[in-house]
Image (cartoon, rainbow, N blue to C red):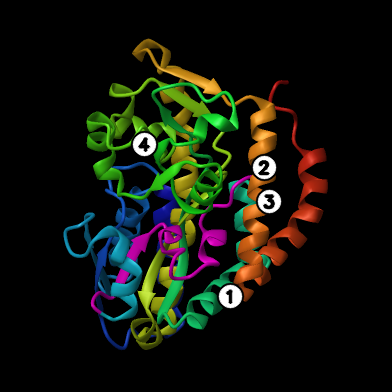
Amino acid sequence: MKLFKALTGIAGAIALTTGSVYADDLRWKMPVAFSTNLPGLGSPAAWVADNLNTASDGSIQVRVYEPGKLVPAFDILQSVSDGKVSAGYTWIGYDQGKVPAIPLFAAVPFGMKPWAYTGWYYYGGGHEMLQEVYANKGFKVHAQLCGIIGPETAGWYKDKINTLEDYKGLKIRFAGLGGKVLEKLGASVTMMPGGELFQALEKGTIDATEFSMPAIDQILGFDQVVKYNLFPGWHQQFTAQYMLINKDEWNNATDAQKALVEASCTAATTLALAEGEYKNGKVLAGFQAKGVSADQIPREVLQDLKKVTQEVLKEEAANDADFKRVYDSQNEFMETYKVWDSRAYVPSDL
Protein backbone atom coordinates (compact mmCIF):
# COMPACT_ATOMS: atom_id res chain seq x y z
CA MET A 1 0.00 0.00 0.00
CA LYS A 2 2.91 2.35 0.72
CA LEU A 3 4.26 1.67 -2.78
CA PHE A 4 0.83 2.30 -4.27
CA LYS A 5 0.41 5.64 -2.48
CA ALA A 6 3.93 6.68 -3.43
CA LEU A 7 3.32 5.99 -7.13
CA THR A 8 -0.02 7.72 -7.30
CA GLY A 9 1.19 10.56 -5.12
CA ILE A 10 4.12 11.19 -7.43
CA ALA A 11 1.80 11.19 -10.45
CA GLY A 12 -0.45 13.70 -8.75
CA ALA A 13 2.43 15.93 -7.73
CA ILE A 14 3.83 15.95 -11.26
CA ALA A 15 0.46 16.89 -12.69
CA LEU A 16 0.01 19.79 -10.27
CA THR A 17 3.54 21.16 -10.40
CA THR A 18 3.69 21.14 -14.19
CA GLY A 19 0.77 23.49 -14.41
CA SER A 20 -1.95 20.98 -15.40
CA VAL A 21 -5.31 21.97 -13.98
CA TYR A 22 -8.26 19.65 -13.49
CA ALA A 23 -10.87 21.31 -15.71
CA ASP A 24 -13.79 19.40 -14.19
CA ASP A 25 -14.10 17.07 -11.26
CA LEU A 26 -14.88 13.48 -12.19
CA ARG A 27 -17.58 11.65 -10.25
CA TRP A 28 -17.71 8.06 -11.42
CA LYS A 29 -19.96 5.24 -10.29
CA MET A 30 -18.07 1.96 -10.71
CA PRO A 31 -19.85 -1.40 -10.34
CA VAL A 32 -17.49 -4.31 -9.84
CA ALA A 33 -17.72 -7.95 -10.84
CA PHE A 34 -16.00 -9.25 -7.70
CA SER A 35 -16.49 -8.50 -4.03
CA THR A 36 -13.76 -6.15 -2.85
CA ASN A 37 -12.89 -8.53 0.00
CA LEU A 38 -11.44 -11.02 -2.52
CA PRO A 39 -7.63 -10.62 -2.52
CA GLY A 40 -6.03 -9.65 -5.81
CA LEU A 41 -9.28 -10.09 -7.71
CA GLY A 42 -11.70 -7.62 -6.17
CA SER A 43 -9.41 -5.69 -3.82
CA PRO A 44 -7.68 -3.64 -6.57
CA ALA A 45 -10.95 -1.87 -7.38
CA ALA A 46 -11.13 -0.52 -3.83
CA TRP A 47 -7.43 0.44 -3.88
CA VAL A 48 -7.85 2.37 -7.10
CA ALA A 49 -10.98 4.22 -5.99
CA ASP A 50 -9.45 5.27 -2.68
CA ASN A 51 -6.13 6.36 -4.08
CA LEU A 52 -7.51 8.20 -7.09
CA ASN A 53 -9.44 10.35 -4.66
CA THR A 54 -6.32 10.91 -2.52
CA ALA A 55 -3.85 11.52 -5.34
CA SER A 56 -6.18 13.87 -7.22
CA ASP A 57 -7.08 15.79 -4.06
CA GLY A 58 -10.70 14.97 -4.69
CA SER A 59 -10.77 15.80 -8.40
CA ILE A 60 -11.45 12.13 -9.21
CA GLN A 61 -13.96 10.41 -6.97
CA VAL A 62 -14.90 6.84 -7.78
CA ARG A 63 -17.72 5.18 -5.87
CA VAL A 64 -17.47 1.40 -5.88
CA TYR A 65 -20.64 -0.71 -5.99
CA GLU A 66 -20.32 -4.31 -4.89
CA PRO A 67 -21.47 -7.06 -7.33
CA GLY A 68 -25.13 -6.77 -8.29
CA LYS A 69 -25.77 -3.60 -6.28
CA LEU A 70 -25.95 -1.30 -9.31
CA VAL A 71 -25.83 -3.54 -12.41
CA PRO A 72 -25.47 -7.33 -12.79
CA ALA A 73 -21.85 -8.49 -12.82
CA PHE A 74 -22.08 -9.76 -16.39
CA ASP A 75 -23.62 -6.50 -17.69
CA ILE A 76 -20.73 -4.19 -16.80
CA LEU A 77 -19.32 -3.80 -20.33
CA GLN A 78 -22.66 -2.90 -21.89
CA SER A 79 -23.56 -0.54 -19.04
CA VAL A 80 -20.27 1.35 -19.34
CA SER A 81 -20.44 1.51 -23.13
CA ASP A 82 -24.02 2.83 -23.01
CA GLY A 83 -23.10 5.47 -20.44
CA LYS A 84 -25.41 4.08 -17.77
CA VAL A 85 -22.37 4.09 -15.49
CA SER A 86 -19.09 5.94 -15.99
CA ALA A 87 -16.80 3.04 -15.19
CA GLY A 88 -16.71 -0.62 -14.23
CA TYR A 89 -14.20 -3.14 -12.92
CA THR A 90 -14.36 -6.69 -14.23
CA TRP A 91 -12.77 -9.78 -15.73
CA ILE A 92 -13.44 -8.99 -19.36
CA GLY A 93 -13.43 -12.64 -20.43
CA TYR A 94 -17.09 -12.79 -19.41
CA ASP A 95 -17.89 -10.96 -22.66
CA GLN A 96 -16.39 -13.47 -25.10
CA GLY A 97 -19.83 -13.97 -26.64
CA LYS A 98 -19.93 -10.31 -27.64
CA VAL A 99 -16.22 -9.75 -28.36
CA PRO A 100 -14.57 -13.04 -29.40
CA ALA A 101 -10.98 -11.77 -29.06
CA ILE A 102 -11.46 -10.52 -25.51
CA PRO A 103 -10.46 -13.76 -23.70
CA LEU A 104 -6.93 -13.35 -25.05
CA PHE A 105 -6.64 -10.29 -22.79
CA ALA A 106 -8.23 -12.06 -19.81
CA ALA A 107 -6.96 -15.64 -19.54
CA VAL A 108 -5.56 -18.07 -22.11
CA PRO A 109 -5.37 -21.84 -21.53
CA PHE A 110 -1.72 -22.92 -21.37
CA GLY A 111 -0.95 -19.23 -21.84
CA MET A 112 1.55 -16.75 -20.50
CA LYS A 113 2.69 -16.36 -16.93
CA PRO A 114 1.46 -13.11 -15.37
CA TRP A 115 4.71 -11.22 -15.78
CA ALA A 116 5.06 -12.36 -19.38
CA TYR A 117 1.54 -11.15 -20.13
CA THR A 118 2.23 -7.72 -18.65
CA GLY A 119 5.40 -7.53 -20.75
CA TRP A 120 3.39 -8.15 -23.92
CA TYR A 121 0.52 -5.90 -22.83
CA TYR A 122 2.63 -2.86 -21.94
CA TYR A 123 5.43 -3.20 -24.48
CA GLY A 124 4.08 -5.47 -27.24
CA GLY A 125 1.13 -3.38 -28.30
CA GLY A 126 -1.45 -5.24 -26.24
CA HIS A 127 -2.99 -2.15 -24.67
CA GLU A 128 -3.53 -0.48 -28.04
CA MET A 129 -4.94 -3.65 -29.60
CA LEU A 130 -7.43 -3.99 -26.75
CA GLN A 131 -8.89 -0.55 -27.48
CA GLU A 132 -9.18 -1.47 -31.17
CA VAL A 133 -10.84 -4.81 -30.41
CA TYR A 134 -13.58 -3.10 -28.41
CA ALA A 135 -14.06 -0.34 -30.99
CA ASN A 136 -14.28 -2.86 -33.84
CA LYS A 137 -17.25 -4.50 -32.14
CA GLY A 138 -18.97 -1.15 -31.46
CA PHE A 139 -18.24 -0.73 -27.76
CA LYS A 140 -17.45 2.77 -26.54
CA VAL A 141 -15.02 2.08 -23.73
CA HIS A 142 -11.46 2.79 -22.71
CA ALA A 143 -9.93 -0.31 -21.09
CA GLN A 144 -7.09 -0.12 -18.58
CA LEU A 145 -5.30 -3.17 -17.17
CA CYS A 146 -5.93 -2.75 -13.45
CA GLY A 147 -5.10 -6.04 -11.75
CA ILE A 148 -3.56 -9.43 -12.44
CA ILE A 149 -3.16 -12.63 -10.47
CA GLY A 150 -1.34 -15.87 -11.06
CA PRO A 151 -2.78 -19.29 -11.88
CA GLU A 152 -6.18 -20.36 -10.69
CA THR A 153 -6.72 -23.89 -9.49
CA ALA A 154 -8.08 -26.28 -12.12
CA GLY A 155 -11.28 -26.50 -10.12
CA TRP A 156 -13.10 -28.21 -7.27
CA TYR A 157 -14.56 -31.67 -7.91
CA LYS A 158 -16.53 -34.36 -6.11
CA ASP A 159 -14.44 -37.04 -7.83
CA LYS A 160 -10.92 -37.21 -9.20
CA ILE A 161 -10.13 -36.37 -12.81
CA ASN A 162 -7.89 -39.11 -14.20
CA THR A 163 -8.66 -38.99 -17.94
CA LEU A 164 -10.34 -36.70 -20.44
CA GLU A 165 -13.32 -39.06 -20.36
CA ASP A 166 -14.00 -37.92 -16.81
CA TYR A 167 -15.10 -34.53 -18.16
CA LYS A 168 -17.81 -36.05 -20.33
CA GLY A 169 -21.25 -35.20 -18.97
CA LEU A 170 -19.81 -33.26 -16.04
CA LYS A 171 -21.92 -30.27 -14.99
CA ILE A 172 -19.28 -27.65 -14.33
CA ARG A 173 -18.93 -23.90 -13.98
CA PHE A 174 -15.95 -22.96 -16.14
CA ALA A 175 -15.06 -19.60 -17.66
CA GLY A 176 -13.55 -18.28 -20.87
CA LEU A 177 -11.68 -20.28 -23.46
CA GLY A 178 -11.14 -23.07 -20.95
CA GLY A 179 -14.89 -23.55 -20.93
CA LYS A 180 -14.86 -24.04 -24.70
CA VAL A 181 -12.18 -26.71 -24.27
CA LEU A 182 -14.30 -28.63 -21.77
CA GLU A 183 -17.38 -28.29 -23.96
CA LYS A 184 -15.40 -29.94 -26.73
CA LEU A 185 -14.74 -32.80 -24.32
CA GLY A 186 -18.45 -33.26 -23.63
CA ALA A 187 -18.80 -31.34 -20.36
CA SER A 188 -21.96 -29.34 -19.66
CA VAL A 189 -20.41 -25.93 -19.04
CA THR A 190 -22.31 -23.14 -17.34
CA MET A 191 -21.39 -19.63 -16.24
CA MET A 192 -22.51 -17.96 -13.02
CA PRO A 193 -21.10 -15.30 -10.69
CA GLY A 194 -18.81 -16.33 -7.84
CA GLY A 195 -21.38 -15.51 -5.18
CA GLU A 196 -23.74 -18.20 -6.48
CA LEU A 197 -21.26 -21.07 -6.68
CA PHE A 198 -21.32 -22.38 -3.10
CA GLN A 199 -25.07 -22.87 -3.19
CA ALA A 200 -24.93 -24.40 -6.67
CA LEU A 201 -22.37 -26.96 -5.48
CA GLU A 202 -24.29 -27.66 -2.30
CA LYS A 203 -27.59 -28.24 -4.13
CA GLY A 204 -26.00 -30.29 -6.91
CA THR A 205 -26.90 -27.80 -9.63
CA ILE A 206 -23.29 -28.24 -10.70
CA ASP A 207 -20.89 -31.13 -10.04
CA ALA A 208 -17.75 -29.03 -10.05
CA THR A 209 -16.50 -25.49 -10.39
CA GLU A 210 -13.46 -23.37 -10.98
CA PHE A 211 -13.31 -19.79 -9.83
CA SER A 212 -9.93 -18.47 -8.75
CA MET A 213 -6.79 -19.04 -6.68
CA PRO A 214 -6.72 -20.77 -3.24
CA ALA A 215 -6.76 -17.54 -1.21
CA ILE A 216 -10.08 -16.64 -2.88
CA ASP A 217 -11.67 -20.08 -3.16
CA GLN A 218 -11.36 -20.65 0.58
CA ILE A 219 -13.27 -17.43 1.27
CA LEU A 220 -16.10 -18.74 -0.92
CA GLY A 221 -16.09 -22.02 1.03
CA PHE A 222 -15.79 -24.55 -1.78
CA ASP A 223 -13.78 -26.87 0.49
CA GLN A 224 -16.83 -27.24 2.72
CA VAL A 225 -18.76 -28.98 -0.09
CA VAL A 226 -16.25 -30.83 -2.27
CA LYS A 227 -12.80 -32.12 -1.38
CA TYR A 228 -10.85 -32.58 -4.61
CA ASN A 229 -8.99 -29.45 -5.69
CA LEU A 230 -6.98 -29.89 -8.88
CA PHE A 231 -3.75 -28.26 -10.11
CA PRO A 232 -2.25 -26.77 -12.19
CA GLY A 233 -4.67 -24.12 -13.44
CA TRP A 234 -4.04 -24.95 -17.08
CA HIS A 235 -6.99 -22.84 -18.25
CA GLN A 236 -5.87 -19.59 -16.56
CA GLN A 237 -2.16 -19.18 -15.99
CA PHE A 238 -2.86 -15.49 -15.61
CA THR A 239 -6.14 -13.75 -14.79
CA ALA A 240 -6.30 -10.07 -15.75
CA GLN A 241 -8.85 -7.55 -14.53
CA TYR A 242 -9.61 -4.19 -16.13
CA MET A 243 -11.10 -0.85 -15.34
CA LEU A 244 -13.50 -0.02 -18.16
CA ILE A 245 -14.30 3.68 -18.59
CA ASN A 246 -16.99 5.13 -20.83
CA LYS A 247 -15.26 6.56 -23.90
CA ASP A 248 -16.88 10.00 -23.62
CA GLU A 249 -15.92 10.19 -19.94
CA TRP A 250 -12.35 9.25 -20.82
CA ASN A 251 -12.14 11.77 -23.64
CA ASN A 252 -13.46 14.52 -21.37
CA ALA A 253 -10.83 13.85 -18.70
CA THR A 254 -7.74 16.05 -18.66
CA ASP A 255 -4.30 14.65 -19.41
CA ALA A 256 -3.50 14.91 -15.71
CA GLN A 257 -6.58 12.92 -14.74
CA LYS A 258 -5.82 10.26 -17.36
CA ALA A 259 -2.25 9.99 -16.07
CA LEU A 260 -3.53 9.38 -12.56
CA VAL A 261 -5.87 6.62 -13.72
CA GLU A 262 -3.07 4.97 -15.68
CA ALA A 263 -0.61 5.23 -12.78
CA SER A 264 -3.16 3.98 -10.26
CA CYS A 265 -4.10 0.96 -12.35
CA THR A 266 -0.46 0.10 -13.05
CA ALA A 267 0.26 0.18 -9.32
CA ALA A 268 -2.86 -1.88 -8.62
CA THR A 269 -1.71 -4.49 -11.13
CA THR A 270 1.56 -4.89 -9.23
CA LEU A 271 -0.18 -5.04 -5.86
CA ALA A 272 -2.77 -7.57 -7.01
CA LEU A 273 -0.10 -10.01 -8.19
CA ALA A 274 1.92 -9.47 -5.01
CA GLU A 275 -1.10 -10.11 -2.79
CA GLY A 276 -1.95 -13.39 -4.46
CA GLU A 277 1.64 -14.64 -4.45
CA TYR A 278 1.96 -13.76 -0.76
CA LYS A 279 -1.23 -15.47 0.42
CA ASN A 280 -1.70 -18.57 -1.72
CA GLY A 281 1.07 -20.76 -0.31
CA LYS A 282 -0.18 -20.55 3.27
CA VAL A 283 -3.76 -21.32 2.24
CA LEU A 284 -2.73 -24.28 0.09
CA ALA A 285 -0.53 -25.65 2.88
CA GLY A 286 -3.53 -25.64 5.20
CA PHE A 287 -5.83 -27.59 2.91
CA GLN A 288 -4.76 -31.02 4.20
CA ALA A 289 -5.95 -30.16 7.70
CA LYS A 290 -9.38 -29.45 6.21
CA GLY A 291 -9.52 -32.82 4.50
CA VAL A 292 -8.92 -31.38 1.03
CA SER A 293 -6.94 -33.38 -1.52
CA ALA A 294 -4.91 -30.96 -3.61
CA ASP A 295 -4.14 -33.26 -6.53
CA GLN A 296 -2.08 -32.74 -9.66
CA ILE A 297 -3.66 -33.51 -13.03
CA PRO A 298 -1.61 -36.31 -14.62
CA ARG A 299 0.88 -35.04 -17.19
CA GLU A 300 -0.61 -37.13 -19.98
CA VAL A 301 -4.03 -35.57 -19.29
CA LEU A 302 -2.47 -32.09 -19.42
CA GLN A 303 -0.86 -32.94 -22.75
CA ASP A 304 -4.24 -34.03 -24.13
CA LEU A 305 -5.89 -30.87 -22.76
CA LYS A 306 -3.25 -28.78 -24.51
CA LYS A 307 -3.98 -30.49 -27.84
CA VAL A 308 -7.69 -29.72 -27.52
CA THR A 309 -6.84 -26.16 -26.47
CA GLN A 310 -4.80 -25.64 -29.61
CA GLU A 311 -7.75 -26.85 -31.70
CA VAL A 312 -10.07 -24.37 -29.96
CA LEU A 313 -7.66 -21.45 -30.39
CA LYS A 314 -7.21 -22.18 -34.10
CA GLU A 315 -10.98 -22.38 -34.58
CA GLU A 316 -11.48 -19.05 -32.81
CA ALA A 317 -8.74 -17.43 -34.89
CA ALA A 318 -10.37 -18.68 -38.09
CA ASN A 319 -13.72 -17.18 -37.08
CA ASP A 320 -12.62 -13.69 -35.99
CA ALA A 321 -10.00 -11.40 -37.54
CA ASP A 322 -9.28 -9.58 -34.27
CA PHE A 323 -8.76 -12.87 -32.45
CA LYS A 324 -6.25 -13.97 -35.10
CA ARG A 325 -4.37 -10.66 -35.01
CA VAL A 326 -4.03 -10.67 -31.22
CA TYR A 327 -3.27 -14.40 -31.07
CA ASP A 328 -0.53 -14.05 -33.69
CA SER A 329 0.98 -11.12 -31.78
CA GLN A 330 1.07 -13.08 -28.53
CA ASN A 331 2.59 -16.13 -30.21
CA GLU A 332 5.26 -14.00 -31.87
CA PHE A 333 6.22 -12.56 -28.51
CA MET A 334 6.28 -15.98 -26.85
CA GLU A 335 8.70 -17.37 -29.43
CA THR A 336 11.43 -15.12 -28.07
CA TYR A 337 10.19 -15.01 -24.48
CA LYS A 338 10.51 -18.80 -24.18
CA VAL A 339 14.23 -18.49 -24.90
CA TRP A 340 14.57 -16.22 -21.88
CA ASP A 341 12.11 -18.09 -19.66
CA SER A 342 13.69 -21.51 -20.23
CA ARG A 343 17.22 -20.31 -19.42
CA ALA A 344 16.95 -17.52 -16.89
CA TYR A 345 14.90 -18.91 -13.99
CA VAL A 346 16.17 -21.47 -11.50
CA PRO A 347 14.01 -24.65 -11.59
CA SER A 348 11.40 -24.60 -8.83
CA ASP A 349 12.63 -27.90 -7.36
CA LEU A 350 16.11 -26.52 -6.58
* Residue placed under numbered mark 1 in the picture: 128
Label 2 with label 4: CB-CB less than 8 Å: no
* Residue placed under numbered mark 2 in the picture: 306
Residue 199, given in percent of the width and then of the height, sits at: 22, 35
Where does the magenta region start and end?
A: 84-110
The structure residue drawn at horizontal position 36% and vertical position 36%, both measured from the top left corner, is 216
How many angstroms separate mark 4 from mark 1 (CA)?
A: 31 Å
Residue 96, given in percent of the width and then of the height, sits at: 46, 63
Q: Which mark is residue 216?
A: 4
* Residue placed under numbered mark 3 in the picture: 310
Between residue 319 and residue 90, name the one nearer to us: 319
Among the two numbered marks 1 and 3 on one chain, the one whose residue lies closer to the N terminus = 1
Q: Nearer the viewer, mark 1 or mark 2?
A: 2
The residue tagged with tag 1: helix, strand or loop?
helix
Among the two numbered marks 4 and 3 on one chain, the one whose residue lies closer to the N terminus = 4
How many angstroms separate mark 4 from mark 3 (CA)?
A: 29 Å
The amino acid type found where label 1 is placed reads Glu
Q: Nearer the viewer, mark 2 or mark 4?
A: 2
